[in-house]
Structure formats: structure tokens, C-alpha cells
Image: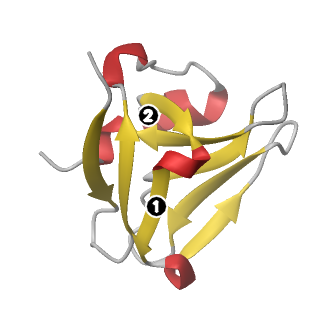
């Protein structure tokens, strides 16, 4: 599946983003946080992710090694994306595929 442009966000609409991403490599993470929340993630370089609304409406949760900023809406609690670094230091956006529009 080639890279495409998507929009997405949280349940209440306070947090919105646009992202260029290839969904072919989406994964269902089995860590303790993701498995409890049912996340399906797809990853893209951070420069292909644009937060279009809601920067002030998000809060961060970090756990384990504290290398991923799990961003969630302070109103509805939905985590639509996360930001972090790859082992090589490059910045990455993790997109919760369940939060993409359509």
C-alpha cells in the first residue's frame, strides 16, 4: 500500500492532525498499554505528521523507558498519536490507525 494523506484525531474532535503514511506495516502492539487499549499503530517520519488543532488539549503519558510521548486528549482521553525517536535517533510519529477518519 503506497503512502497516502490521511486526517484523524480524537473522539471529541479537540485534537486533529494530518499525516502522510503507508498503512501496510500497521501493527497491533502487545505491550501492556497498547494491548489494554486496543491500539493499532502505523509509523512515519515525524516531518510527515502535522498537528492541525489541539496542541493545548493534549497531555503526555510516558512509561517503561520513557522514550515515547503518548499524547492523549485531556477532554475525551483518546490517544490518537504518539511521538518518539527511532534507535538511530530519527524522530517518528506513531499513528493510532483506529483514529484515522473514515
Quarter containing the N terminus: top left
Q: Which mark is residue 39?
A: 2
Quarter residue 87 falls in? top right
Q: Residue at x 37, y 61 (%)?
A: 17
Q: How is the image coloured?
A: secondary structure
Secondary element at tag 1:
strand
Q: Which mark is residue 33?
A: none
**Residue 54 horizontal side relative to residue 22, left or right:** right
The residue at the far bottom in this view is 56
| Relative image position of residue 89 (x, y in whole percent) | 84, 35
Q: Nearer the viewer, residue 9 or 76?
A: 9
The residue at the far left in this view is 102
Q: Residue at x 37, y 42 (%)?
A: 20
Residue 66 versus residue 32 in the image, above or below: below
Label 1 vs label 2, nearer the camera: 1
| Relative image position of residue 9 (x, y in whole percent) | 33, 60
- Circle 1 sits on which residue? 50
Disc 2 residue crowd, few under 14, some 14–19, many 20+, Cα 10 Å = many
Amino acid at each position: 500500500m503506497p503512502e497516502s494523506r490521511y486526517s484523524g484525531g480524537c473522539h471529541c474532535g479537540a485534537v486533529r492532525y494530518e499525516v502522510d503514511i503507508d498503512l501496510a506495516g500497521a501493527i497491533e502492539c502487545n505491550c501492556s498499554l497498547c494491548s489494554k487499549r486496543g491500539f493499532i499503530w502505523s509509523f512515519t517520519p515525524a516531518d510527515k505528521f502535522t498537528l492541525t488543532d489541539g496542541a493545548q488539549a493534549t497531555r503526555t503519558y510516558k512509561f517503561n523507558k520513557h522514550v515515547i510521548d503518548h499524547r492523549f486528549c485531556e477532554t475525551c482521553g483518546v490517544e490518537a498519536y504518539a511521538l518518539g525517536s527511532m534507535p538511530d535517533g530519527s524522530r517518528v510519529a506513531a499513528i493510532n490507525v483506529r483514529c484515522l477518519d473514515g
